[in-house]
Amino acid sequence: MQSSSGILTKFESKSSRAKGIAFHPKRPWILVSLHSSTIQLWDYRMGTLIDRFEEHDGPVRGVDFHKTQPLFVSGGDDYKIKVWSLQTRRCLFTLNGHLDYVRTVFFHHELPWIVSASDDQTVRIWNWQNRSLLCTMTGHNHYAMCAQFHPTQDLVVSASLDQSVRVWDISGLRKKHSAPTSMSFEDQVSRANANQTDMFGNTDAVVKFVLEGHDRGVNWVAFHPTMPLIVSAGDDRLIKLWRMSETKAFEVDTCRGHFQNASGCLFHPHQDLILSVGEDKTIRVWDLNKRTAVHTVKRENDRFWVIAAHPEINLFAAGHDNGVMVFKLERERPASAVYQNTLFYITKDKCVKSYDFQKNVESPTLLSLKKLGSPWVPPRTLSYNPAERSVLVTSPTDGGTYELVNLPRDGSGAIEPAGSKRGQGNSAIFVARNRFVVLNTSTQTVDIKDLMNNTTRSFKPPVGTSDIYFGGTGNLLILTPTAVHLYDIQQKKTTAELAVTGVKYVVWSNDGLYAALLSKHNVTIVTKTLEQVSTLHETIRIKSATWDDAGVLLYSTLNHVKYSLLNGDNGIVRTLDQTVYLVRVKGRNVYCLDRAAKPRILQIDPTEYRFKLALVKRNYEEMLHIIQNSSLVGQSIIAYLQKKGYPEIALQFVQDPATRFELAIECGNLEVAVEVAKQLDRPKLWTRLSTEALAHGNHSIVEMCYQKLKHFDKLSFLYLTTGDNTKLSRMAKIAEHRGDFTSRFQNALYLNDVEDRIQMFKEIDLYPLAYMTAKAHGLEEECQSILEATGLTEEQLNLPTFGEPLTPPKPVVPTYKANWPTKTTSQSFFEKALLGQMEGLSLEEEPAAANGPGEAEEEGAVKKDALGEAEEDEDAAGWDMGEDIVPEVEEGFVNVDSTEAGGAGSSEADLWARNSPLAVDHVAGGSFETAMQLLNRQVGAVNFAPLKPRFLEVYQASKTYLPASAGLPSLVNYVRRTVEESDPREVLPIIPRDLEYLAANDLQRGYDAMKANKLEDGLRIFKGILHAVLVNAVGSESEVAEAKKLISSASEYAVAMSIELGRRALGSPDEVSKNPQLLKRSLELSAYFTIPKIEVPHRQLALLNAMNLSFRSKNHSSALSFANRILAHGGASKLLETARRIKSQCERNPHDAVEIEFDQFAEFEICAASHTPIYSGTAYEECAFDGSKYHTKYKGTVCTVCEVCEVGKHGSGLKLFA
């Protein structure tokens, strides 16, 4: 789009001289009639020639589209008027009658009439429906150059080289030719007497006014669309303006300026302007009110002959010596800026308004900018500063100006700006709260200014800079014709550059991470550091863009709203009746400004792009929701899914059987493929299916395919490989029935049936072969009978030497009873969800999470998306999953890391991980990664190092190894806990040290350690119990309750022992007694040791310890309370005796020498990390696994009891039973 002295050229054609032009009222079409006798139909948006019409002889001077019908009319130098159909693109009929060149032709706006002006000095009106001449208007005495209907009244205006303009009244003609019902009685009488009235000289068309004032011939004349005005252009180089009333018409003024014949003129349909063209090679725009020139556009070599205006939109076309140009007088893009939920924009009458997206309301006028620039040039850009509530407006007048104005708080009509700051500049934008940047393209400088309009700094931008945009905080985007530069204002240097040509606009995403660079036909999506993400091309001009909250770019062309994902996938969202400029997308609403600068809301259906976005992000839950709740069907979406490698999802959309079959084969869904193959029953499909099923190892389907195809040889071989001898014998019989000896021989070989082979050779008279077969297999009797039958003796035969007879190998394991999987057939997460196999899509119910380490990370990523459970620290404390995990004996066997779950001949270990949602089964299967993810989700496990011994214990215990031949890997036998189970989907591994074992052995060892005062050993044993229960499985719900009790008990013991060990670590009794601080802490810890809920005999030990310590330290009150508690619990007589003795001594003086933080009457828990009280009623955090309590400051740390879980992280709860 070139901009030449204020007009914007939208389209140019190259052809011979253009004499007539017409715009289609609705479509982007323009008819151009040429001096070379051709009429061209162009699409000026696409810039393409749609058709050409060549039936006239000689130049075609007039052309016009019908307002509503698919018709157009043309008139030429062959004296003919032709009416054409746009549908068939043929001439419908020709109107003959003119005696000289036809100059112009126009349709009436509502009646089926055509008006034509001709060099035969007449103006004629024709009826195109009955193809008749209605009226000939005579009166001009030179060529009639132009004639047009009035847009609303029954008037015709004509111009002639006789230097006059005539206005004709054709109301009589309307009355005469309209339907009788709409006529009054008088009109009907006068119509009946029509011939009589003609005698008195009253014709159907009467001259109303003759306008004289031109000194030379008049070339063109036109009515104003709404006002009683006429404009005319003549060879006297003048444009004259006439006004008419009911009774008279008079000249108003003259526009002088053309310096050659003025050949055409018209009124601007929407503004007070006149446009004229002339042979002086200029298009001139005049102010209708002041009659002064506003713009002049000059061409180098081409004289202009005609000008036309689009009836609806602000487009004009001018025909010249070498074709036609379609142009606009001004940019129609409203200047606007969006801040949060408000849009600020400038209306057509140069007022600043705002629009609230949430309330959908338009504000009253906030500010009037009437005085900014020229009245005919709209402001170009608007930049908003929320901190100061000010706007920066630029206008292209006077080489580019800007104005900085503060907005009032509330609008109250057309407010003149108070104290605005102005300056020269082509672009101006805010870059900070108190800074804005101005670009001056003529001097090629960029000024950084403060709010007082003082320049704080200037710099020279790259050569050819055409525009500047905000580039993120403290940055500037500088546009040149061939590149975009990111300029850092602080560092005063270009930090990034991207070669993109012709960028005109920049649109930032809501989060400021991406920007869309819009040029005339391209959209380039870049990151905030100018790295290109994707690019797309449009044939129709791109007008605007805005970002959806989900990070999808919506952009508008002249006639569509389209979308583009970050990866460049794009499509159409909806069509547009008129061009709009997008400003915001919210849900199903697109907010935009139309060309009249009015806010509009468009309804869109975002389903397609949301579905594609969910596909790209692997957000399966969203996709599932869309498939189940919308009618997103069509070839394009199916092709898209197939192209992106999601045939199993495409399968859900397709109804057509052939396509379903293709997709089913592609995604390995044999069930659907079989169903469709049965439905269509074509040999080609059965062949494809047999190949695919064979690759899957699904030999039952292969068998069915071969049977359908009657591939007997292949069937026999299949039965041989799967070890199905019964069916192989049946194949031999079938071959016999068919008389197919080759097949029979083959089957006999497979079955190792020597007799049948001999019999067959006999039947086909191949006795030598029969004899050799019998001889080779040592069947002497058979040999004799053959010799007898042939009448020969053994001596007469010359036999080769025989080796040992070979028997065909038999399958080691007959596999015909069940399929032998050789290829992944597991349903995707998506298919399972669609089949309703996923309960609420919850991760715990979803065994597919366990695909082995190879796929775990990818799966994990998917799940996080699907459930919004983005755990940042998932494998932070995991250990190296390298060689130390796989035991030595397993060398060369199945590398757990590399086998794909459910892959070719997948091992039982993989099945365990897939069959169970329990972490322990994943560990046994070698899928440590998924086990760790499960534990993280269930109990917030983050530090897996302490679990390493348990992981290895479980992993090694579930397999036994049997040494095979030397040099070969050992044979692996998988040890199951589900011994009776035959269904591979239900098999599960044995778990070492199950709950029963832990309760009977480890727990007792822990108790013994407590009793024997071996607290370090005890602590290690109880932590071991916790780790063993964490990675374990139970057989029933009741056992789950037992496991919880065991966890709770082990946790209490671990806390108690760590408190006492902490007390002992303070120092020797002597050191402690000397240091009051240590003594106080020692007494507190001994008191806290009595709080955890451990078994009574063990608690008595803790109480005894605390009582003795308190008594020795003269804390008689505390010692007394401990003695009372010992006596309350009862127990060994020796212990009770000690307690009574101390009690009696303490009662004499029940006071504490050392003040300690221990309230014997308050309820409290002990913090497992700090060993201090947590009183009831105060906030605390706990470990999701063992239930140990912590002060809130320990949230996010690793639990000191189990040493695995994160304190305060709540998961879904430990799963031990499924």
Image (cartoon, rainbow, N blue to C red):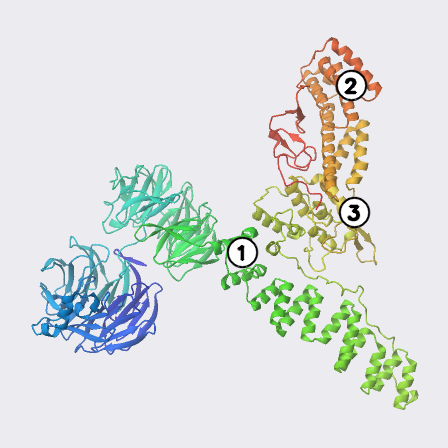
Q: Residue 1146, position in %: x, y?
A: 75, 11
Which disc, if any, is residue 757? none
Residue 1026 vs residue 517: left or right? right
Disc nearer the start of the sequence (1/2): 1
Eyeballing the image, is 885 above or below 1066?
A: below
Q: Residue 145, position in %: x, y?
A: 16, 70
Q: Residues within 10 Å of mark 2 (few under 14, many from 20)?
A: some
Residue 377 vs residue 359: left or right? left
Identify the element where label 2 is drawn: helix
Identify the element where label 1 is drawn: helix
Identify the element where label 3 is drawn: helix
Disc nearer the start of the sequence (2/3): 3
Kindly indicate the quadrant of the structure image that contains residue 1142. top right
The residue carrying mark 2 is: 1127
The residue carrying mark 3 is: 957
Eyeballing the image, is 96 above or below 788?
A: above
Amino acid, disc 3: Ala
Which is more foreground, mark 3 or mark 1?
1
Which disc, if any, is residue 627? 1
Disc nearer the start of the sequence (3/1): 1
